[in-house]
């Protein structure tokens, strides 16, 4: 390969990689509870509304911050969930710039139904024999 061919090939690879990376943006923000305390390890997913496919996924860090990479010019359903808290879901439409969106989750209140315990004795009585 000549020097010019290597240069042109290198430029082509550079332009293609820039074009590919330019088609993605980041959705960032924080997830907190109702007392404004950060929720680490919360799940954040981006579902493409047209294809119904998971396009992005992130987990919050110990400060409740998340980052999800998604495609530009696309409609998404962004859902945040954390064990013991009610999930939240919003609809977003991405453009050419990054998006920042914070979430506040409320504690999930659940009442358990009563539990009935039935125990059968393992002893059988037949006549005068146990």
Image: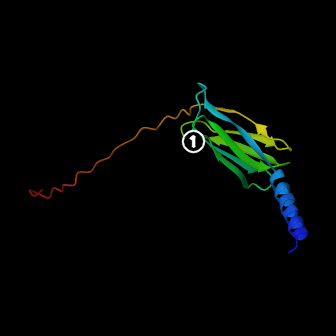
Q: Residue furthest bottom?
A: 1
Quarter holding the N terminus is bottom right
Q: Tell me the residue that label 1 is attached to.
A: 41
Q: Residue furthest left?
A: 128
Q: What residue lies at 76% left-to-right and 44% top-to-bottom?
A: 26
Q: Nearer the viewer, residue 9 or 114?
A: 9
Residue 14 image point, x, y percent: 84, 59
Q: Is residue 43 visible?
A: yes
Q: Residue furthest top?
A: 35
Residue 24 image point, x, y percent: 80, 50
Q: Residues within 10 Å of mark 1 (few under 14, many from 20)?
A: some
Left or right? Give the position of 64 relative to 24: left
Look at the numbered disc 1 and give the secondary structure of its residue.
loop
Q: How many marks?
A: 1
Residue 42 occupies quadrant: top right
Q: Is residue 23 visible?
A: no
Residue 61 image point, x, y percent: 60, 40
Q: What residue lies at 54% left-to-right and 37% top-to-bottom?
A: 84
Left or right? Give the position of 70 relative to 30: right
Q: What residue lies at 71% left-to-right and 50% top-to-bottom?
A: 56
Q: What residue lies at 86% left-to-right and 44% top-to-bottom?
A: 96
Q: Nearer the viewer, residue 16 or 74?
A: 16
- The image shows residue 21, relative to residue 32, as above or below, that is below
Q: Nearer the viewer, residue 73 or 87?
A: 73
Left or right? Give the position of 59 relative to 116: right
- The image shows residue 104, relative to residue 116, as above or below, that is above
Residue 34 occupies quadrant: top right
Quarter holding the C terminus is bottom left
Residue 60 occupies quadrant: top right
Left or right? Give the position of 4 relative to 77: right
Query: Which colouring convention does the figure follow?
Result: rainbow
């Amino acid at each position: 390969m000549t020097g010019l061919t290597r240069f042109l090939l290198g430029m082509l690879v550079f332009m293609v990689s820039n074009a590919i990376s330019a088609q993605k943006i980041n959705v960032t923000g924080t997830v907190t509870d109702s007392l404004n305390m950060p929720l680490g390890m919360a799940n954040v997913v981006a579902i493409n509304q047209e294809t119904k496919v998971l396009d992005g996924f992130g987990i919050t860090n110990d400060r409740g911050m998340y980052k999800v990479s998604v495609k530009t010019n696309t409609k998404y359903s962004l859902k945040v969930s954390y064990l013991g808290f009610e999930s939240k879901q919003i609809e977003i439409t991405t453009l050419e710039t990054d998006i920042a969106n914070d979430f506040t989750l409320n504690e999930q209140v659940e009442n358990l139904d009563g539990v009935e315990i039935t125990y059968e004795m393992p002893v059988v009585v037949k006549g005068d024999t146990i």
